[in-house]
């Protein structure tokens, strides 16, 4: 069998934020806030941030991205408080995450297309493809026919969020596109390497059990 999966940044942050998220989730549940509303609100904020990013308004984009980040975990905290056992919330959350990826990297693509930087546009598209593959491989591996839990890799969703925030705020502070160029290169490589890591992990897991 493959070695135990390593602790990811997402795992570490979850341990640090479990208690405050649980309290916030309980508070919102008492107010009657539905977790799906939080999920959709997070996507709306990402869409607004993506518009700012496409227009080159990096500070505004970064602040709105930062504001949307806690909502990605808060919807789950509210759902746990309400003891929701349905699967639709998970499907909605994953769907909104994929839309968010498309909006973010689409905004990078648009920004550089306007500048006629087709090299950076291609990097943004490569990062988008890698991000989708990271999630797709996990989803396929979780299927009942495969049944392999796959969270390995350098660039899980949380690492991607941190990278995007860092590059956008750096671009705003330096008033330069250089942080975006470096960040997109890292994301394009990191996400696709992570996809291959997960694919290899699934292969080893299946071989170990004789599938």
Image (cartoon, rainbow, N blue to C red):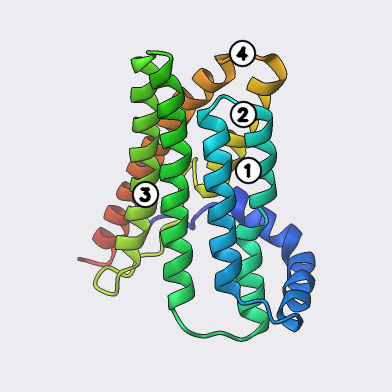
Q: Quadrant of the N terminus?
A: bottom left
Horizontal side, residue 64 vs residue 124: left or right:
right
Q: Which mark is residue 168?
A: 2
Judging depth in this view, the residue of 176 and 147 nearest the camera is 176
Density class for disc 1 (Cα within 10 Å; few <14, some 14-19, many ≥20) is many
The Cα atoms of the two marked residues, 1 and 4, are separated by 19 Å
Mark 1 element type: helix
Picture coordinates of residue 109 (x, y %)?
Answer: 40, 28
In the picture of the structure, the residue carrying the numbered disc 1 is: 65
Quick check: 121 above or below 60? above
The Cα atoms of the two marked residues, 2 and 3, are separated by 28 Å
Density class for disc 3 (Cα within 10 Å; few <14, some 14-19, many ≥20) is many
* Nearer-N-terminus badge (3/4): 4
Mark 3 element type: helix
In the picture of the structure, the residue carrying the numbered disc 4 is: 176
In the picture of the structure, the residue carrying the numbered disc 3 is: 198
Picture coordinates of residue 131 (x, y %)?
Answer: 40, 43
Q: Name the residue: 35% across, 52% down.
A: 201
Quick check: 168 above or below 12? above
* Nearer-N-terminus badge (2/4): 2
The Cα atoms of the two marked residues, 1 and 2, are separated by 9 Å
Q: Quadrant of the C terminus?
A: bottom left
Asked where in the image residue 114 lies, by quadrant, the reply is top left
The reply to whether dot 1 and dot 2 touch (C-beta < 8 Å) is: yes
User: How many marks do you count on the picture?
Assistant: 4
Horizontal side, residue 42 vs residue 90: left or right:
right
The reply to whether dot 3 and dot 1 touch (C-beta < 8 Å) is: no
Q: Name the residue: 61% across, 86% down.
A: 83
The Cα atoms of the two marked residues, 3 and 4, are separated by 34 Å
Q: Name the residue: 58% across, 19% down.
A: 179
* Nearer-N-terminus badge (2/3): 2
* Nearer-N-terminus badge (1/2): 1
């Amino acid at each position: 069998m493959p070695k135990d999966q390593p602790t990811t940044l997402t795992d570490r942050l979850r341990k640090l934020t479990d208690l405050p998220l649980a309290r916030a989730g309980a508070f919102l549940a008492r107010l009657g806030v539905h977790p799906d509303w939080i999920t959709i609100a997070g996507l709306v904020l990402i869409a607004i941030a993506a518009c700012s990013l496409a227009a080159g308004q990096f500070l505004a984009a970064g602040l709105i991205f930062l504001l949307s980040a806690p909502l990605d975990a808060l919807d789950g905290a509210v759902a746990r408080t309400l003891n929701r056992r349905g699967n639709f919330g998970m499907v909605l959350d994953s769907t909104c995450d994929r839309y968010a990826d498309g909006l973010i990297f689409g905004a990078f693509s648009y920004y550089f297309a306007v500048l006629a930087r087709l090299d950076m546009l291609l990097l943004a598209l490569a990062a988008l493809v890698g991000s989708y593959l990271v999630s797709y491989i996990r989803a396929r591996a979780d299927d009942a026919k495969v049944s392999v839990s796959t969270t390995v890799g350098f660039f899980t969703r949380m690492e991607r969020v941190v990278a995007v925030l860092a590059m956008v705020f750096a671009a705003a502070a330096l008033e330069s596109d250089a942080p975006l160029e470096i960040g997109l290169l890292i994301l394009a490589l990191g996400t696709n390497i992570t996809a291959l890591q997960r694919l290899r992990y699934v292969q080893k897991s299946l071989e170990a059990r004789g599938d």
